[in-house]
Image (cartoon, rainbow, N blue to C red):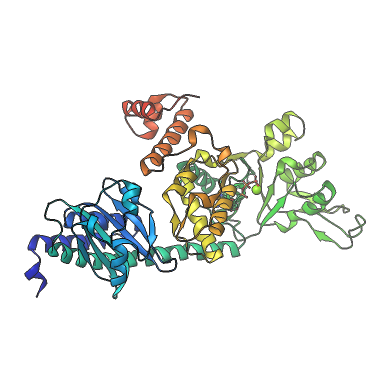
């Protein structure tokens, strides 16, 4: 029997259309699977549906996508590989119509009990790649009393095969892209630098400033809380400058006692002090033709500050124990997480040095004020650490992602990275779950706790934070904030009311 004999023309056209659609965009696997399921439901007029993927390693079937009235409740449900009707389909690698679910012994009521969505009839077909069943599409409750027909089964089988191929291609694409990210990161790390992830407008703006000032030789002072990435911005200043072929030398000014720091920065000659058994080059000399990064500059002792001031002014200094003046060509970038203006007030930091360093100040905002970066960073760390720990994670569960977005990240990106690393160590692929992250919930502000795990709730939480931020930036002037957000002022006031945003 030819296809055209058994399938009516409309269905055939729909199949062709769906096939084109699902093969036209592989960039987002979740979106692709949702697309597949929506099309499947429409094709056979079902009221709800699920797409389950086989996890051979764990011998389970996982609800990857679920649509319909109780879709969100069913999502992420995991059952045994031979459980229920989907399990039967996997085991026999065959499709199945059950038009009286309640009286079928193969039916497992676990999901129904959990979601509260009652199933009357069901059509379940395997998603096959070269005869191997990689998943199951289930369509529930046909919108006609007679239930699902053999023709429904036949069209859905054809579609499921196409869907399986599309899914596999999308998976290959994602894996290849992830691999490229990891390899690129390895190249950057091998050169002694870090990969910089940037998505939020505020950070992109900072990078734009860096691009513009990189070519100059003026000193830059980078400020911001601990863990915000100050060192990465210093690296970018160097890499974007004409000095990028030269050295990038880091000095942690807080790590060494005064005497050692002086010799570390400027070098010493043999015999300058008891342990000076040979001549030694200082970091300033090593940084010649490149950039020196003075980290934790707020901790530099007063006695060294005058010497540093001279280097900034004239690029010249003497090694410890020597009277010979050395001149170097270096760009100075400094950073601190301390309140340096307060240190100046307290006379712990020379004001003339501060003004010299502060020619181009660069403030890096904390992570909680640039939430758009959070998912990007989390996914980058996940790729990197999955590779290192040889675990095949492909993402975060919805609950984990909502917890990540709701958390305030007092330790900023460093804390996020540690948390994802913990998740990779504790968790089991393919998804990092909320509990694996071991977030310090105690530090979550009350209004940040997201008990509702639905996508809508998470998005609302995000919206709330973002609107709050823009409103603060605009002194709670709604007209200005609405302009920045590119929305109507009336819409903004409605959102403020709906999301219960209060002026603090
Ligand atoms: N934009 C970013 N993209 C990727 N990784 C980042 C980014 N920003 C920071 N990190 C990572 O976060 C960690 C902390 O960054 P960094 O050391 O630059 O912070 P810091 O601001 O210098 O903090 P501290 O004041 O404590 O020294 C590092 O492991 C760094 O690789
Ligand atoms: Mg640092």
Looking at the picture, tell me which residue is in the foreground, 126 or 11.
126
Residue 8 as seen in the image, left or right of residue 335? left
Looking at the picture, tell me which residue is in the foreground, 233 or 96.
96
Looking at the picture, tell me which residue is in the foreground, 328 or 165.
165
Rendering quarter of residue 64 = bottom left
Which residue is depicted at the point 74% across and 56% down?
285
Note whether 478 is above or below 486 in the view shown. Answer: above
Rendering quarter of residue 62 = bottom left
Which residue is depicted at the point 13% across and 65% down?
150
Percent position (x, y) of residue 91? 31, 70
Count up the numbered dots. Answer: 0
Note whether 159 is above or below 47 in the view shown. Answer: below
Q: Is residue 204 visible?
A: no
Which residue is depicted at the point 49% across and 56% down?
380
Percent position (x, y) of residue 179? 47, 65
Looking at the picture, tell me which residue is in the foreground, 212 or 105.
105
Quadrant the N terminus occupies:
bottom left
Residue 130 as seen in the image, left or right of residue 1? right
Q: Is residue 346 visible?
A: yes
Percent position (x, y) of residue 369? 51, 38
């Amino acid at each position: 029997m030819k296809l055209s004999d058994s399938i009516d023309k409309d269905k055939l056209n729909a199949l062709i259309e769906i096939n084109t659609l699902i093969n036209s965009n592989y960039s987002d696997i979740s979106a692709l699977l949702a697309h597949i399921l929506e099309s499947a439901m429409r094709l056979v007029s079902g009221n709800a549906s699920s797409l389950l993927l086989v996890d051979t390693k764990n011998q389970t079937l996982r609800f990857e996508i679920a649509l319909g009235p109780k879709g969100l409740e069913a999502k992420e449900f995991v059952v045994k590989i031979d459980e229920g009707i989907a399990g039967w389909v996997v085991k026999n690698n065959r499709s199945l119509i059950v038009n009286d679910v309640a009286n079928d012994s193969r039916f497992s009521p676990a999901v129904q009990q959990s979601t509260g969505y009652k199933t009357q009839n069901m059509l379940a077909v395997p998603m096959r790649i070269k005869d191997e069943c990689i998943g199951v599409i289930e369509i529930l409750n046909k919108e006609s009393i007679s239930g699902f027909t053999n023709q429904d089964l036949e069209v859905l089988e054809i579609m499921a095969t196409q869907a399986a191929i599309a899914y596999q291609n999308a998976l290959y694409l994602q894996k290849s892209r992830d691999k490229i990210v990891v390899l690129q990161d390895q190249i950057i790390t091998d050169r002694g630098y870090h990969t910089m992830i940037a998505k939020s407008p505020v950070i992109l703006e900072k990078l734009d400033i860096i691009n513009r000032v990189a070519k100059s030789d003026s000193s830059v002072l980078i400020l911001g809380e601990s863990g915000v990435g100050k060192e990465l911005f210093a690296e970018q200043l160097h890499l974007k400058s004409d000095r990028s072929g030269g050295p990038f030398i880091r000095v942690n000014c807080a790590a060494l006692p005064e005497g050692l720091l002086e010799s570390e920065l400027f070098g010493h000659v043999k015999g300058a002090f008891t342990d000076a058994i040979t001549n030694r080059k200082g970091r300033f000399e090593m940084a010649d033709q490149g950039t020196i990064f003075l980290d934790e500059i707020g901790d530099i002792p007063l006695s060294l500050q005058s010497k540093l001031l001279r280097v900034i002014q004239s690029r010249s200094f003497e090694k410890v124990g020597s009277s010979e003046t050395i001149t170097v060509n270096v760009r100075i970038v400094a950073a601190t997480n301390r309140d340096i203006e307060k240190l100046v007030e307290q006379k712990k930091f020379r004001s003339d040095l501060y003004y010299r360093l502060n020619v181009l100040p660069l403030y890096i905002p904390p992570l909680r004020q640039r939430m758009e970066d959070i998912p990007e960073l989390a996914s980058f760390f996940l790729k990197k650490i999955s590779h290192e720990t040889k675990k095949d994670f492909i993402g975060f569960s919805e609950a984990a992602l909502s917890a990540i977005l709701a958390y305030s990240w007092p330790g900023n990106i460093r804390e996020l990275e540690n948390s994802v690393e913990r998740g990779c160590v504790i968790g089991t692929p393919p998804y990092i779950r909320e509990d694996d992250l071991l977030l310090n919930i105690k530090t979550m502000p009350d209004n940040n706790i997201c008990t509702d795990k639905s996508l809508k709730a998470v998005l609302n939480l995000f919206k709330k934070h973002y609107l709050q931020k823009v409103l603060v930036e605009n002194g709670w002037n709604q007209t200005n904030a609405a302009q920045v957000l590119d929305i109507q002022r009336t819409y903004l006031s409605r959102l403020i009311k709906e999301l219960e945003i209060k002026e603090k």
